Image (tube, coloured by chain):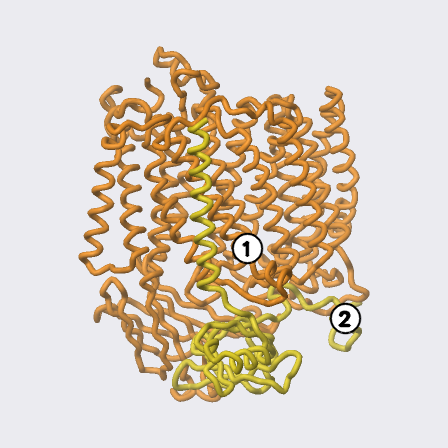
Chain colours: A yellow, B orange
């Protein structure tokens, strides 16, 4: 029976190591997922959060998107989905996703630099879903564009 | 005409599948061969009907039948024909039908292959397969109807997502689906063995090849997906720990664990409950992967629209499957008792068990990281997120442990390793690994994980090379053959063992490719024609890329802006490279096509990151200004080489006709020696799969 116990100990050991890895992994890398309103509130409450990475989602403000021709720099404004008056300005220095446009809903990871500027290290677009077509209503509405058809 | 026929076929398939399933279970229980035969014919019929239904969808796509919602949303007139064909699996509605079709194919194949064998299991095998088929046909018919028509016929469709208009995308999903669905067969055999109470070595033997088949397709599917991401998503990486990627990795991990632990059951008669649990878990995870992809419950680059109907249907199916498996295993627990106990930590059993535990640990970490945001939000209401840093931090150490076990497992002795066994088998490989590690350190490699990957990797390679060398040499001596012939015969005599080693070589090469990411470099620069950008590669090369200008081209359904770059390495002209941006017309979306110049050790990866706002306004140089991101990704090509080696190794292990381990009448007989018993004898562990408990230098099959 002692052998069984030893192997049980081995099993517990592996489980402990994995649990420890997962636990430290989560605590080291977990980031908060906030809206622009929450981001600004939180940073005001505890300025230390500014140094920590956060994930922010919101809607790109139409017409706010600019690119620089001297360096790889995309700037755009992102509005809070619930309170569109609250906006942050995003700087992004990597190739922007192909699905990005200035009506997209975006999820960004990066740091809040203060003064409403967010330095993003990653931008993902969330256009409903990327591989799914638009909602079915699209065709249920009999608009001129699709309506006439060969019927 | 064909689409209507397809829809009709799908409706007919459902009652046949359900009725066939009922007949199969009744036939098995009452021992009625006529009912069982009828059930098996139902399996073939369902497969044929699903094929007709799929042909109907393809015909609708190719024929531009936009009155179908699915076609209108995933195709357009100007789409290339082969992308129209791939429309079958491009979207939710088709892909679930496609899933059912693959499952139908494997079910039909399994029934046909076993038409004269394993008759005591086959009624239940057919029954389980028909139940799974029924589930998918019900989903297809009632939740995601691919043949649903619109009230009117649009003039043109909305087009296929440009990211799916890529050849890897035409083969990545089918390969993955083949892997997922092939696993239903071993699962069906496991359940059948439990139901019939026939828990001897038989079901394992049948199951093993099917698991390996599924594993083969899963591996290829995952690697194809990585390749697609690398070429098409245009951010220089191949794996993002995206929920859907993770979901495809989970069944792969558990299936890998099973492929190893099954050897312990074969040769030592242990871990029977464990193996049963692993088969069930893998199957449930293939369903989970489909659920995660199709329900849209978790945000992902792959996600399809959120569909709660599908989520509930899949959750329900998974819950029922889990409960059925648990009840069956508990019911048959007395028949699943181990033949013997573990004897020592330092034994192959322990190494394999540790491999299993660590693999499951990795699986758990991946699952936890994937579900964590959903769970936290559900429990605490606060939204958090974990991303690639989490998965890398957790899985790199676990991966390194697995890598080391890959070198230890094959050569450590069964039962109890002696100091002599350890010294003889591990001294030289350890020295090689340490030497390579020291050499790399001396060359300036300081990244801990990269160093460890190479040191442990070369240790594993050394173990495998020595094994091959010992076997070849011994065979050459005994049989008087030349070394190349002896090598080929060696592999042929025990394909599973040596094929497995080749798979290990592929995994090592692939891991080294992953480690290369530690030394990725990149520069970003805006260039006007004639200007150039330089980047140093970690191998000491200096690349200089000169921007020659932008040209515009018109594709079948898109516009292309193609930037031409002249590439020099260390001052020597290598050639030109193009990198482009595209604007698709249906759906209107831009697309980045990266330019990749691959050498044996590194990829030059050039992204046309953005075009100046004035592009297109004239042909002067100032109207062609563009911003580039240039990356050097060391060792990425090794990932693809590794994948290829894994595929070759798996095929060698799978190839039919060789001596079947544990059941090879001719293996020992032809040399006038006693054939092995299928069941391990009590005294000496019979291990046909991995023979290194024999005196070294004895080829497999000779004792």
Residue in the image at 45% along x and 16% along y:
B677
* Residue B548 in the image, given as x and y percentages of width and height: 35, 78
Task: Classify mark 2: residues with Cα within 10 Å, few (<14), some (14-19) or many (20+).
Answer: some
* Residue B595 in the image, given as x and y percentages of width and height: 40, 67
Residue closest to the far front: A2
**Left or right placement of residue B560 versus residue B123 in this view:** left
Q: Is residue B61 above or below residue B263?
A: below
Instruction: Please name the residue that numbered disc 2 is placed on.
Output: A149
Q: Nearer the viewer, residue A86 or B607?
A: A86
* Residue A105 in the image, given as x and y percentages of width and height: 60, 75
* Residue B116 in the image, given as x and y percentages of width and height: 62, 21
How far apart marks 2 and 1 lie (CA) works out to: 30 Å
Instruction: Please name the residue that numbered disc 1 is placed on.
Output: B170
Q: Quadrant of residue B88?
A: bottom right
Q: Quadrant of the C terminus of chain B?
A: top left
Residue in the image at 33% along x and 19% along y:
B702
């Amino acid at each position: 029976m002692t052998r069984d116990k030893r192997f049980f100990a081995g099993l517990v050991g592996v489980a402990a190591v994995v649990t420890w890895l997962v636990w430290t992994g989560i605590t080291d890398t977990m980031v908060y997922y906030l809206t622009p309103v929450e981001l600004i509130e939180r940073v005001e409450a505890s300025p230390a959060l500014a140094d920590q990475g956060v994930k922010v989602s919101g809607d790109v403000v139409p017409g706010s998107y600019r690119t620089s021709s001297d360096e790889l720099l995309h700037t755009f404004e992102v509005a809070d989905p619930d309170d569109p008056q609250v906006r942050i300005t995003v700087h992004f220095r990597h190739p922007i996703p192909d699905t990005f446009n200035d009506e997209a809903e975006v999820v960004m990871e990066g740091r809040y630099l203060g003064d409403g500027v967010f330095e993003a290290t990653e931008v993902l677009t969330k256009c409903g879903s990327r591989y799914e077509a638009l909602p079915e209503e699209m065709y249920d509405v009999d608009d001129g564009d699709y309506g006439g058809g060969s019927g | 005409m064909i689409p209507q026929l397809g829809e009709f076929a799908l409706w007919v398939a459902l009652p046949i599948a359900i009725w066939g399933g009922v007949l199969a279970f009744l036939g098995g229980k009452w021992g009625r061969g006529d009912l069982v035969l009828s059930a098996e014919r139902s399996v073939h019929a369902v497969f044929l009907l699903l094929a007709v239904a799929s042909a109907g969808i393809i015909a609708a796509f190719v024929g531009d039948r936009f009155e179908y919602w699915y076609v209108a949303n995933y195709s357009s007139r100007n789409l290339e024909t082969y992308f129209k064909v791939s429309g079958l699996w491009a979207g939710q509605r088709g892909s679930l039908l496609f899933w059912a079709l693959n499952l139908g194919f494997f079910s039909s194949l399994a029934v046909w292959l076993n038409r004269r064998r394993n008759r005591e299991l086959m009624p239940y095998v057919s029954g389980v397969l028909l139940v799974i088929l029924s589930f998918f046909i019900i989903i297809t018919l009632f939740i995601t109807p691919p043949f649903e028509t619109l009230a009117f016929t649009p003039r043109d469709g909305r087009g296929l997502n440009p990211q799916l208009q890529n050849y890897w995308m035409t083969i990545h999903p089918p390969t993955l689906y083949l892997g997922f669905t092939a696993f239903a067969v071993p699962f069906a055999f496991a359940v059948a063995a439990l139901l019939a109470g026939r828990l001897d070595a038989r079901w394992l033997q049948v199951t093993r090849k099917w698991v390996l088949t599924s594993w083969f397709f899963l591996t290829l599917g995952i690697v194809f997906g990585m390749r697609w991401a690398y070429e098409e998503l245009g951010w220089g990486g191949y794996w993002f720990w995206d929920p859907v990627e993770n979901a495809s990795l989970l069944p792969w991990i558990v299936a890998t664990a099973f492929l190893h632990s099954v050897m312990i059951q074969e040769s030592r008669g242990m871990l029977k409950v464990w193996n049963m649990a692993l088969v069930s878990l893998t199957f449930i995870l293939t369903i989970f992967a489909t659920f995660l992809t199709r329900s849209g419950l978790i945000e992902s680059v792959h996600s399809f629209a959120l569909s709660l109907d599908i989520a509930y249907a899949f959750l329900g199916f998974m819950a029922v499957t889990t409960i059925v498996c648990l009840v069956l295993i508990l019911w048959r627990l007395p028949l699943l008792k181990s033949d013997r106990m573990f004897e020592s930590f330092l034994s192959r059993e322990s190494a394999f068990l540790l491999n299993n535990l660590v693999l499951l640990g990795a699986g758990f970490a991946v699952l936890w990281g994937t579900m964590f945001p959903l769970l936290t939000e559900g429990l605490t209401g606060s939204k958090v997120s974990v991303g690639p840093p989490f998965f890398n931090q957790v899985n790199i150490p676990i991966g390194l442990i697995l890598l080391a076990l890959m070198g230890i497992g094959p050569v450590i002795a069964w039962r109890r390793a002696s100091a002599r066994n350890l010294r003889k088998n591990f001294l030289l490989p350890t020295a090689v690994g340490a030497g390579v590690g020291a050499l790399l350190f001396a060359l300036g490699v300081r990244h801990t994980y990269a160093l460890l990957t190479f040191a442990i990797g070369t240790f594993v390679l050394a173990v495998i090379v020595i094994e091959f060398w010992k076997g070849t040499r011994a065979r050459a001596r005994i049989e008087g053959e030349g070394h190349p012939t002896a090598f080929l015969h060696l592999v042929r005599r025990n394909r599973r063992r040596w094929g497995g080693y080749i798979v290990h070589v592929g995994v090592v090469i692939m891991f080294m490719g992953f480690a290369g990411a530690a030394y990725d470099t990149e520069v970003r620069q805006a260039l006007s024609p004639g200007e150039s950008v330089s980047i140093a590669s970690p191998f000491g090369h200096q690349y200089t890329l000169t921007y020659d200008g932008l040209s515009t081209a018109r594709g079948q359904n898109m516009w292309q802006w193609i930037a031409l770059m002249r590439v020099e390495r260390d001052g020597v002209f290598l050639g030109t490279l193009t990198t482009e941006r595209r604007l698709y017309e249906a759906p209107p979306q831009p697309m980045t096509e990266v330019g990749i110049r691959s050498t044996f050790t590194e990829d030059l990866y050039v992204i046309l990151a953005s075009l100046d706002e004035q592009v297109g306004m004239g042909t002067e140089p100032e109207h062609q200004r563009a911003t580039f991101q240039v990356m050097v990704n060391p060792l990425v090509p090794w990932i693809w080489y590794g994948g290829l080696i894994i595929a070759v190794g798996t095929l060698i292990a799978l190839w039919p006709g060789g001596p079947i381990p544990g059941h090879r009448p001719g293996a020992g007989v032809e040399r006038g020696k006693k054939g092995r018993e299928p069941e391990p004898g009590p005294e000496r562990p019979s291990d046909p799969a991995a023979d290194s408990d024999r005196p070294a230098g004895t080829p497999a099959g000779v004792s």
